[in-house]
Image (cartoon, rainbow, N blue to C red):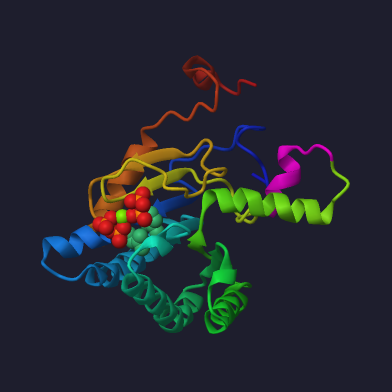
Amino acid sequence: MGLFSSSTKEVPPIQDVPQHVAVIMDGNGRWAKKRFLPRVAGHQRGLEAVRAMVKACVRLDIKFLTLFAFSSENWRRPPEEVTFLMSLFLEALDREVKKLHEANVILKLIGDRAAFNEALQQKMLEAEQKTAANTGLTLTIAVNYGGRWDVVNAFNQLLQAQPQLKQIQESDLTPYLSMPYAPEPDLFIRTGGETRISNFLLWQLAYTELYFTPTLWPDFDDAAFEAALTSYRQRERRFGRTSEQLAEPKAS
Ligand code: IPE
Ligand code: IPE
Ligand code: MG
């Protein structure tokens, strides 16, 4: 599957282990509330679940993991919580990048970075540069990310590059979307029980298998991930075709 290949243009290869897993890590606040702790304690524990998930993906040889850490709508939260999340993110960048680098992980950050302060933008850039030549798992963290922003941003970049265009096709746009280096996600996981996309990867999830679990993100452990992967293996990914066609050897 080449760069920029599209599930709506050609049927991607189907494997038992997903190549790309995308996760909405939801339920931190409720995890904390259940324990009579402040919401931010849930975010702190959520970071531990992130570490475990990254390790699991490395172990399972999953090539791409994309995590939704902060949405373009999360600015609507109480300012104290937003501030806490920003400092947790900065701290995590400081502490984890070295370890990620040692684990051969390529770190990428997607989302509108203009909203972050200079120091944080600089740290993000440095982290990406440091890990760019690695060859293991590609870990993408979506911060101040919104699926609609992604598409509009891609359009704007395309228009800037080719202002003469009167009409476009998919393949014109995809190089400008947030994850041109990754195949479309095979498996989407949302923890925390809500069954919505919340403006995550709208374009890229076109043919992704969706998995929703009531498990709260801080409780999402290896066994919970295994359950998601088992569900994924049982899916029939038809990409528009019929079951019968899938059963035929080498049908075109
Ligand atoms: C997800 O957990 C983390 C972020 C959105 C940053 P929540 O904070 O949304 O937790 P709940 O949904 O309130 O339980
Ligand atoms: C989605 O979770 C965003 C992240 C996990 C970063 P939210 O908890 O913000 O989603 P909604 O607003 O309840 O749909
Ligand atoms: Mg939530």
Which residue is the extreme one toward the right? 164
In-front residue for pair 244/220: 220
- What is the quadrant of the N terminus in the image? top right
Q: Measured along the vertical axis of the image, is residue 34 above or below residue 191? A: below
Q: Position of residue 216 (x, y in %)?
A: 24, 55
Q: Residue 232, can we see it?
A: yes
Relative horizontal placement of residue 119, taking residue 2 as reference (left or right): left
Q: Quadrant of residue 160?
A: bottom right
Q: Measured along the vertical axis of the image, is residue 185 above or below residue 117? A: above
- What is the quadrant of the C terminus in the image? top right
Queried whether the magenta region covers residue 218, the answer comes back as: no
Q: Residue at x 62, y 32 (%)?
A: 8
Which residue is the extreme one toward the top? 244
Q: Residue 221, can we see it?
A: no
The secondary structure that most of the magenta stretch takes on is helix
Q: Position of residue 39 (x, y in %)?
A: 23, 67
Q: Quadrant of residue 170?
A: top right
Magenta range: 166-176
Q: Residue at x 55, y 70 (%)?
A: 115
Relative horizontal placement of residue 35, taking residue 144 as reference (left or right): left
